[in-house]
Image: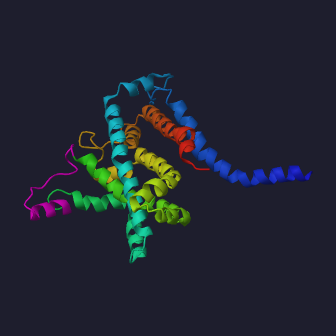
Amino acid sequence: MSPDRRSWIHAWLLLMPAAIVLIGFTYYPAVGTVVESLWTNGTVIRPSKFAGWDNYAQVLGDPVFRKVFRNTVLFALGTVPPAITLALLMALWVNGGLAGRALVRLAYFTPTILPMIAVANIWLFFYTPGIGLLDQIGHGLGVEGHNWLGDADTALACIMVMTVWKEAGFFMIFYLAALQTLPPDLIEAARLEGAGRWTIFRRITFPLLMPTTLFVLINALLNSFKLVDPLFVLTKGGPDNATNLLLYYIYETGFSFFDGAYAATLTVVLLTLLAGIALTQFAVLDRRIHYR
């Protein structure tokens, strides 16, 4: 056997375990989901039939889906910019000559290492009507209590606040690492020219952080479309679907209503949205913000 062929076989043997896992748990389920979305939901009495694009037409006419999609977009708009802004501010704060900055970094990062279910239970202590921390503070100030998670006007905002608290510390780590790699010569030269802190940040620091911002932005967007854990503990998607997000709606459709075909269709819609976000990154944004 030639050395080239031996190296080729050796390389494929090394790749095979990862390839099997990737195909078995990613590509095969994805293809199966697309195929299932083109059939009706079968039962023992009524077997499934080919439906073509009927399931997708049902999605377009589904008022619950429209509300869930609107909730998901509002959730992304209400969590991604605040989380990124807060993460950048925290990174700038702990990157300076702050006394006890190691403890401050740990405090900011601690929510990130907590499981989302545990985070939801912590915030349930804040939001519980009557006995929750928010109502207890309100009673001390003479403000009437409020059912934060039971009111359709405030429930989604409560989930947003909890998510920003959970994710900002994670994004802070990336900004902190990026800040520590910035060339100090540029900042020193700007100071010698009389530039203030705001000018240095606006003209030097933030532009150089744009690749990190892109990375954080894409991860935050993907996370906002995939959030599901806290809804099981806090709201179950209520009241009146006010906090129902796309992934939770898929779970409900598949495992509560046992409509696997429609759940597969919704999953394909979600995958298409996530793929669109990724393609936007690589085709548009990535070219505009990297410096060479």
Q: Is residue 229 above or below residue 62?
A: below
Image position of 48 (left or right of 126): right
In this rendering, position of residue 163 left or right of residue 9: left
Q: Position of residue 226 (x, y in %)?
A: 43, 46
User: Is residue 132 visible to us here?
Assistant: no
Q: Nearer the viewer, residue 134 or 13?
A: 134
To which quarter of the image does residue 23 belong? top right
Give how far across and how far down residue 202 sits, in percent. 43, 54
Q: Nearer the viewer, residue 24 or 147?
A: 147
Q: Give me the residue at 40% from left, 62% from top.
A: 197
In magenta segment, residue 137: yes
Residue 229: x and y in percent read: 38, 52
Q: Is residue 51 above or below residue 201?
A: above
Q: How many marks?
A: 0
| Residue 242: image location, x then y, percent | 27, 41
Which residue is at a point 37% across and 49% down the rendered structure image? 81
Which region is colored magenta? 132-153
The dominant secondary structure in magenta is: loop
Q: Residue furthest left?
A: 142
> Does residue 265 show up?
yes
Is 18 displayed left or right of 171 in the figure?
right
Residue at the image point whose x is 28% and y is 59% from the top: 123
Single out the residue that lies furthest toward the bottom: 100
Residue 65 on the magenta segment: no
The residue lying furthest to the front in this view is 193
